Amino acid sequence: MALLESDAQIRALLGKTRRIAVLGIKTEAAADQPAFYVAKACLDLGYDVVPVPVYYPEAKQILGRPVFRRVCDIDPPVDMVDVFRRPKDLVAHLDDLLAAKPRSVWLQLGIRDDSFAKVLSDAGIDVVQDRCLMVDARRFA
């Protein structure tokens, strides 16, 4: 698989994406935060969004969808994992992502870690870094 950067690659990836796990999603109480409103925008565009919050242990649902605590606990397939975690916190999720085997991992705008991306790519997972999923999904919808 590959590190995806071109518009053609992003368009193709989004064209075959249906189910998106959002790692680091926030709750409705943080509706003004990208980690909530990007997921809501994806839901509004017709994607099946699966919330995977890192915090909010009391949350059982976000966006009316059941919450999972690890990506690998979601019944496959997971087409994409949209990641809202600081670069320094990414490695803590590596085992979970490798076990889940999503088709792709999308690191949101401002999030880049080339060694993390290489491990995922070497495992056959497409990776997008430092781009806003909401912007690209709306652009290529």
Image (spheres, rainbow, N blue to C red):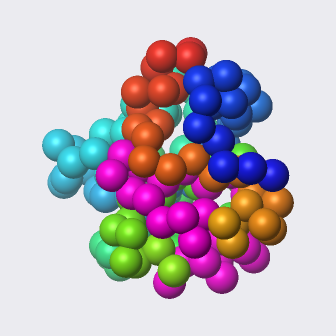
The x and y percentages for residue 13 are 70, 33
Query: Residue 99 falls in which quadrant of the image?
Result: bottom right
Q: Residue at x 66, y 66 (%)?
A: 118
Q: Is residue 70 visible?
A: no
> Is 63 or 108 nearer to us in this picture?
108
Is 7 placed left or right of 57 in the picture? right
Query: Residue 115 falls in which quadrant of the image?
Result: bottom right
Q: State yes or no: residue 137 in magenta.
A: no
Q: Quadrant of the C terminus?
A: top right
Q: State yes or no: residue 112 in magenta.
A: yes
The x and y percentages for residue 20 are 60, 46
The x and y percentages for residue 68 are 55, 68
Q: Is residue 47 visible?
A: yes
The span shown in magenta is 92-117
> Is 29 or 45 nearer to us in this picture?
45
The x and y percentages for residue 121 are 73, 61
Is 126 placed left or right of 32 in the picture? right
Q: Residue at x 54, y 64 (%)?
A: 114
Is 72 placed left or right of 131 in the picture? right
Rendered view: 13 above or below 115: above
Rendered view: 47 above or below 100: above
Q: Residue at x 60, y 77 (%)?
A: 94
